[in-house]
Image: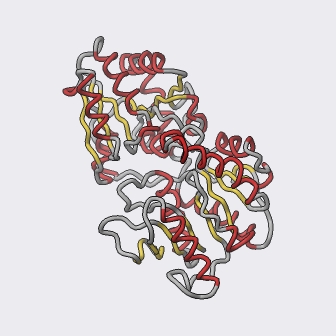
Amino acid sequence: MLLLCWRDTGHPQGGGSETYLQRIGALLAESGIAVTLRTARYAGAPRREVVDGVEISRGGGRHTVYIRAGLAMVAARLRLGPLGRVRPDVVIDSQNGLPFLARLAFGRRVVVLVHHCHRDQWPVAGRVLGRFGWFVESRLSPRLHRSNQYVTVSLPSARDLTCLGVDATRVAVVRNGLDEAPPATLLGERSTSPRVVVLSRLVPHKQIEDALEAIAVVRTRIPDAHLDVIGGGWWQDRLVQRTGQLGISDAVTFHGHVDDATKHALLQRSWVHVLPSRKEGWGLAVIEAAQHGVPTLGYRSSGGLTDSVIDGVTGVLVDGRDELSDSLERLLTDRVLREELGAKAAARSREFSWAQSAAAMHSVLESVHVGGRVSGVV
């Protein structure tokens, strides 16, 4: 099996979509499948290494990764280049806005993996590149892959794909799995003062500014409310600057990239998890917070959160910034509601595992290998 993704989990900007691919790839490798991941290089990364049984081949940067991977796939057909020894039965082409166009090299053996559509994110790339990217994603890719299997991670993302013209009978939903939290972190004490957490990459479309503004509003009525921001990204300096402008520098801690134990320890101390993203395919952070009995507050319009958060049961979904602030205040002041949502979130988190996700993906790949197609939640 050949996996194509613009980043891997070691990349400084790697996130949930990269975790999804590599965790499933690692479990498939454990089952005896030869798995190769082709991705971009970054500072300090070797061209080749094996991680959790997955052979990683790196080449190209943020934009050239697609060109270099394309050349490597063509060369592989001639048994040359960095992928010359790879003989994939199935290829997973991760379309993070742009596909790798593996269809041109491997035909119907290609499965197109889409976490979510990027209509709302493309403007950040600039006017020209944004229009080009959206044309590729919304017009060229659906036409090119009209006979290929698609996989996505949530029902809202599946509906978005059908709106772009993808045949619903070729869209399978394989939801995210979940790594178990370190047992010691589950025994930690909840903070005695109101603690809000954001677990996210720090990039524009995650809209962390909305969480900062919500804390600024809430602090006028709950003076000891504090926000922990877990994660890093190129937008962090802007967020730190915005924190100063709002006058809440003493109420916000930017933790940056942290190890797994630290992440879960911070989640365990939290009262509410806020995910104000403009667009989410699923929202892995939702289920990670849920393990600790922490409900999520986010936007209904993000798409994927309407699948990962059961509104009014495991968290709260709202329709704008004012509602975000009002709902955050309510959750911080209503202990009974908060703990009820958190308990149900924790119960639901036990429904997810990477082993289950890998088994679902394996069944899709087996079907593609024999010429079949799969649809619906697997």
Identified at 75% across, 69% down, the residue is 108
The N terminus, quarter of image: bottom right
The C terminus, quarter of image: bottom right
Q: Which residue lies furthest to the left in this view?
A: 250
Q: Is residue 71 above or below residue 8?
A: below
Q: In this view, does 15 lie above or below 120?
A: below
Q: How many labels does the image show?
A: 0
Nearer to me, 377 or 313: 377
Q: Position of residue 223 (x, y in %)?
A: 24, 16
Q: Which residue lies furthest to the front in this view?
A: 128
Q: Is residue 46 above or below residue 151?
A: below
Nearer to me, 55 or 235: 235
Q: Where is residue 31 in the image (x, y as percent from the top left)?
A: 56, 74
| Left or right placement of residue 323 versus residue 260 in this view | right
| Left or right placement of residue 180 versus residue 111 in this view | left
Q: Residue furthest top?
A: 221
Identified at 49% across, 61% down, the residue is 6
| Left or right placement of residue 243 versus residue 315 in this view | left
| Left or right placement of residue 245 versus residue 148 in this view | left
Identified at 79% across, 61% down, the residue is 147
Identified at 39% across, 76% down, the residue is 47
Q: Where is residue 342 in the image (x, y as percent from the top left)?
A: 45, 32
Q: Position of residue 3 (x, y in %)?
A: 56, 68
